[in-house]
Amino acid sequence: MTLHETASPSTVDGLAVVVVAAGSGTRLGYGMPKALVPVAGRTLLEWALGTVREALPAASVVVTVPAGDTELSAVARGMGAAAVTGGATRAQSVARALAALPGRTTHVLVHDAARCLTPPAVFERVVTALSAGSRAVVPVTEVTDTVRGVDSEGRSAGTVDRSALRAVQTPQGFERELLERVNAAAGLLSGPAPSNPAKEGVQGPGPAGPAGPGVPRGHAAHRAVAQGRDPEGITDDASLVERYAPEHPVDLVAGHAESFKITRPVDLLLARAVVESRA
């Protein structure tokens, strides 16, 4: 794992940040979109955008919001960001944000509003890696829990070697062209054909499906998207690169313990403790 400890964010021109904030937040139990849930008097989205602005003040920022939203859109505009309606899934929301980026954008960071307390240093490490030539960058942390595999019956299949495991965080950074290309290959975005057309049954030049030239309408990725699902095995933006452009390695930088994802009520307790410790 390559760790970048210093950064010069200004060395990457045309930088944009997509903040994904279209989640429902059902597991938090607040009866409102997750990004509107308050932590120490500020919404998750406000905390997330505040860090983006602190770390990357010159970057363009696009926030994905739920359909019919007005409140998150107002928060975004109030903090100098554009708001776009997200899709049925996280990946579809990111694709919609990509379509709304300024034409001058050359590099994109994708960040979850639910990881609202991510320190600025993590953003800086990702941007440093991009400026050094990486085309896909992910912040990670070591796995400290004991992890067991299970078989098809749900029985233990033995302990997994955690030394080879990493927990993935955001922001994840990409060259724009690469991220758009793999989104198109997955049926999420109109765009050019993938560079590895033989993979996953994608054929070369031919009739264009919803994702663009070279990705036929019958492709499994399109069927998943049409049914409101993400293509199988796609859990984050880096997994799109690994699936549809494996010739481009995904580089790793150090994440941070405070970049945890707020999903359950107990996570809100931890978030409040982190905010208090920073005061």
Image (spheres, helix red, strand yellow):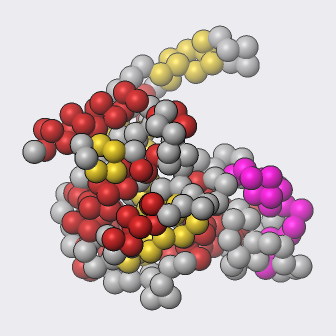
Q: Is residue 72 above or below residue 167?
A: below
Residue at image point 24% right, 37% down: 272
Q: Is residue 232 above or below residue 29?
A: below
Give the quadrant of residue 156. Answer: top right
Magenta residues, dominant SS class: loop
Is residue 80 rendered to the left or right of residue 106?
left
Residue at image point 15% right, 38% down: 276
Query: Image quadrant for the C terminus?
Result: top left
Q: For residue 218, say whether it is visible.
A: yes
Is residue 187 rendered to the left or right of residue 239?
right
Residue at image point 25% right, 47% down: 41
- Foreground pick, 5 / 115: 115
- Is residue 217 inside the magenta stretch? yes
Is residue 110 rendered to the left or right of residue 46?
right
Query: Residue lying farthest bottom?
Result: 104
The magenta region covers 213-230
Residue at image point 51% right, 39% down: 31
Give the quadrant of residue 245. Answer: bottom right
Query: Residue lying farthest left?
Result: 279
Q: Is residue 77 above or below residue 34?
A: below
Coordinates of residue 206 in the picture (x, y in percent): 88, 79
Coordinates of residue 169 in the picture (x, y in percent): 40, 47
- Is residue 229 inside the magenta stretch? yes
Coordinates of residue 200 in the picture (x, y in percent): 78, 57
Coordinates of residue 186 in the picture (x, y in percent): 71, 62
Give the quadrant of residue 171. Answer: bottom left
